[in-house]
Amino acid sequence: MKPTQVCIGMMDSRRPESVATVPAHHLTIVERLGRAVRRFLLVSGGGLLLGNVGLFMFPFPHLHLCLFPFALIFGPLIAWFGWASRVVLGASELPCPRCHGTVAVPAGTVGWPARFNCDRCAIMIELKPAR
């Protein structure tokens, strides 16, 4: 994890954003590809396996006919979302742009813009990379 400058703002707001530093792990191409392949195999492979097992264990083919399209459509879709995330944020604390209280950034938040809620005022906080 290396320190990364981010702009802290409220989602769908035109207020000026403040800048802070959070720990972030910038994923390499190999790490992104590994995440995408693991997600693809988990969703597609699991769906195809359950579809085939369901065909032999249950006398009706509805489960089989539903799980194959599910696996073939959602496997690549979820893999694409795994590939598209370029950064993983570490746990840290930032000031809320509305109530100015301390907000904990959840560990493992992925992608830009990173979004999470303030515990005190319940607004959606948005983190974007600073330019």
Image (cartoon, rainbow, N blue to C red):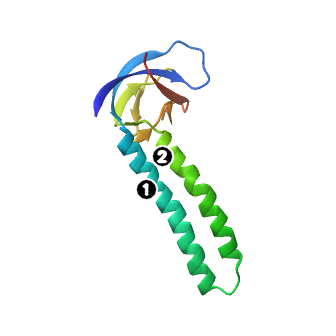
Residue 45 in percent (x, y) is at: 51, 66
Q: Which residue is drawn at 47% across and 61% down?
A: 41
Residue 16 in percent (x, y) is at: 52, 12
Mark 1 surroundings: few (<14), some (14-19) or many (≥20) residues within 10 A:
some
Q: Earlier in the sequence, mark 2 or mark 1?
A: 1
Q: Residue at x 36, y 30 (%)?
A: 93
Q: What residue type is labelled 2?
A: Gly
- Specify the quadrant of the image occupied by residue 65: bottom right
Labelled disc at residue 82: 2
Residue 113 in percent (x, y) is at: 50, 30
Rendered position, 84 above or below 10? below
Count numbered badges in the picture. Answer: 2
Residue 74 in percent (x, y) is at: 60, 56
Mark 2 surroundings: few (<14), some (14-19) or many (≥20) residues within 10 A:
many
Front one among 58 and 29: 29
* Placement of the N terminus among the 4 image quadrants: top left
Q: Is residue 74 left or right of residue 41?
A: right
Answer yes or no: do the residues labelled 2 and 1 have beta carbons within 8 Å? yes
Label 2: which secondary element:
helix
Q: Name the residue under label 1.
A: 38
Distance from Cα at disc 2 to Cα at disc 1: 9 Å
